[in-house]
Image (cartoon, grey):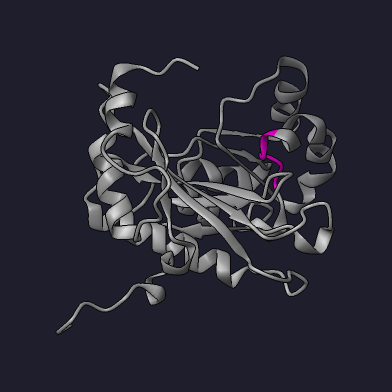
Amino acid sequence: MSRGKKYRASMAMFDRQQLYAPVDAVELVKASAKASFDETVELAVRLGVDPRKADQIVRGTLSLPAGTGRTARVAVFAAGEKAADARAAGADEVGADDLVARVANEGFLEFDVAIATPDMMGQVGTLGRVLGPRGLMPNPKTGTVTEDVGRAVLEFKGGRVEYRTDKVGNVHIRVGKASFEAAQLLENLHAVMDELHRAKPASSKGRYVRAVTLSSTMGPGVHIDPLLARKADEPVAAGA
């Protein structure tokens, strides 16, 4: 696969085989983000779980301390008073039967997060084949099936993100933008790693975190030492 000049220049900045401390990885990713737009920074974590087993699916939500650098587009399936609450909180799309029909019949998917009230899940459930593969199906475990839709909208607009292992046990989460200060990206990275360890399935055996990689939209991935990925794991500098 042919790579562009900027990508090759970024790759020459560091050793692709080396495992870096998080603070060093953040600096390298920021330095290698050379695109003309503000690149998204993403953390990819390979977990030692078997997602084919229901009790080893790792999923949930967390609020990134420094936000994501973008405002999520939120759709809410609700009616009556709850719909009014969602609109007041700033939801981008709000509807009941009409919104279900737009998704089902028109393929409307111009949103990043879908929230639903419990009474709407009977209808929203019929959209499983459309929303499920895209990770957009509302779920009580991630706080996206709730009576308090107003609060949920505010949280997801304010930097709350959803995560879930893919079919081979990887988790991908946006942790900010290349324009973020290094300290902000590091804070978000630590928050994700702490959350993934908190969510470790009891049935998971052996090494839980297998690989950790940080990259920008157009840049190469920098491998992080899994043993140093959490804030509590980082060595304390001499004299600190």
Residue 137 painted magenta: yes
Q: Position of residue 107 (x, y in %)?
A: 70, 19
Examine the rendered structure and indicate whether residue 84 appears above or below residue 211.
above
The residue at 74%/44% (across/down) is 167
Q: How many marks?
A: 0
The residue at 57%/50% (across/down) is 162
Q: Position of residue 114 (x, y in %)?
A: 63, 41
Q: Position of residue 137 (x, y in %)?
A: 71, 42
Q: Residue furthest left?
A: 239
The residue at 59%/51% (across/down) is 163
Foreground: 3 or 144?
Answer: 3
Q: Position of residue 41 (x, y in %)?
A: 38, 41
Most frequent secondary structure within the magenta stretch: loop
Examine the rendered structure and indicate whether residue 190 appears above or below residue 39.
below
Foreground: 185 or 14?
Answer: 14
- From the viewer's perspective, tell me whether residue 178 is left or right of residue 188: left
Residue 229 painted magenta: no
Q: Quadrant of the C terminus?
A: bottom left
- From the viewer's perspective, tell me whether residue 66 is left or right of residue 91: left
The residue at 64%/68% (across/down) is 207
Examine the rendered structure and indicate whether residue 187 appears above or below residue 149.
below
- From the viewer's perspective, tell me whether residue 72 is left or right of residue 53: left
Magenta residues, start to end: 134-138
Foreground: 44 or 38?
Answer: 44
The part of the image, by quadrant, that contains residue 34 is: top left
- From the viewer's perspective, tell me whether residue 30 is left or right of residue 150: left
The part of the image, by quadrant, that contains residue 106 is: top right
